Amino acid sequence: MKNRDDIGPIASGGTVAVTPLQAQDAPTYLFTFGDSYTQTDFTVDGTQPSISNPMGNPILGTGTTSGGINWVGYLTTLYNVSPVLSYNFAVIGATIDNSIVDSKVKDVTSQVRDFELAYSKKPTSAPWSSDNAVFGFWIGINDIGRGHQNTQPNVLVPTLMAQYKCLIEKIYASGGRRFLFLNVPPTDRSPMITKQGPEAVKTHATWVRAYNSGLQSMISDFKSNHTDTTIVLYDTWSFMPKILDDPQTYGFPNATCFNKDGTSCIWWDHYHPGQNYHKLQAADMVQYLQPLGAW
């Protein structure tokens, strides 16, 4: 995928050194939405994030599908140069909208509604502003996984992107001006898909490319109509192959094993990367997140 200057960097490279947090620094409020790759089981009626407890609830490293900390936790507690407070609405199995691709769980449309009910009015528990809040979205894996069986990408992807854009518009209407998007990684190379054979891999890869192309176009269109926004599209589709193509360099035995400890293999299970992969990705993300603050 090629970089587009109007939506910020989407490439990936090395890691960035972490500097100590300064206690006087104002926090960045990180609101995230998505599926199992992002989920931490945060609840809006639980303990709220604070400088001393930036994840709020549950405790760091729980509620994920990585065997420990995921990218949200690392960007909140490790790879940040000023305080980050995490409000994570992501739900395992989620799609963009159940009326388009039904996942039987809380979709991103519902997650954004939960944000609006709990935090859009900037309560005392989360007094965010347009200048210090970042809204992160990593969604699409289940839209592809569940939606590809009954239709074609040129039919489904535009419908998904239209709804996706509506959700971003809702955040914008609430005052959101800083956005982070992650595209879909090459899940066609996950153990679950590769086990299904070459034809399944080819079909899945075609869908991933189509979805990511649609996402990039949607973001560019949104940016052109909202020039007061700061947007970063992080390219997981390009970063994950760096690990999969050279696993031993990163401490993994191969590209297909999985282990529930989240550290022995790239994959935590047959479809979800482990905590050590998330750490590598979060470290790589930092260099592109600087326009958003805190990193």
Image: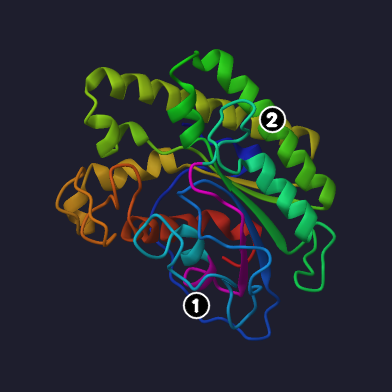
The span picked out in magenta is 76-93
At x 56% / y 42%, what residue is drawn? Answer: 105
Across and down, in percent, residue 242 comes to: 30, 45
Secondary structure at numbered mark 2: helix
At x 46% / y 48%, what residue is drawn? Answer: 36
Across and down, in percent, residue 108 comes to: 63, 42
In screen coordinates, is 155 left or right of 239? right
Q: Amino acid at mark 2?
A: Gln
Question: Main SS type for the magenta part?
Answer: loop
Question: Residue tagged by mark 1?
Answer: 19
Tag in front: 2 or 1? 2
Question: Residue tagged by mark 2?
Answer: 163
Q: CA distance from mark 2 to mark 1?
A: 39 Å
Across and down, in percent, residue 35 comes to: 51, 46
Could you tell me if residue 212 is visible in this image?
A: yes
In screen coordinates, is 249 left or right of 274? left
Residue 26 vs 240, above or below: the answer is: below
Could you tell me if residue 220 is visible in this image?
A: no
> Which quarter shows the C terminus?
bottom right
In screen coordinates, is 125 left or right of 196? right
Quadrant assignment, res 161: top right
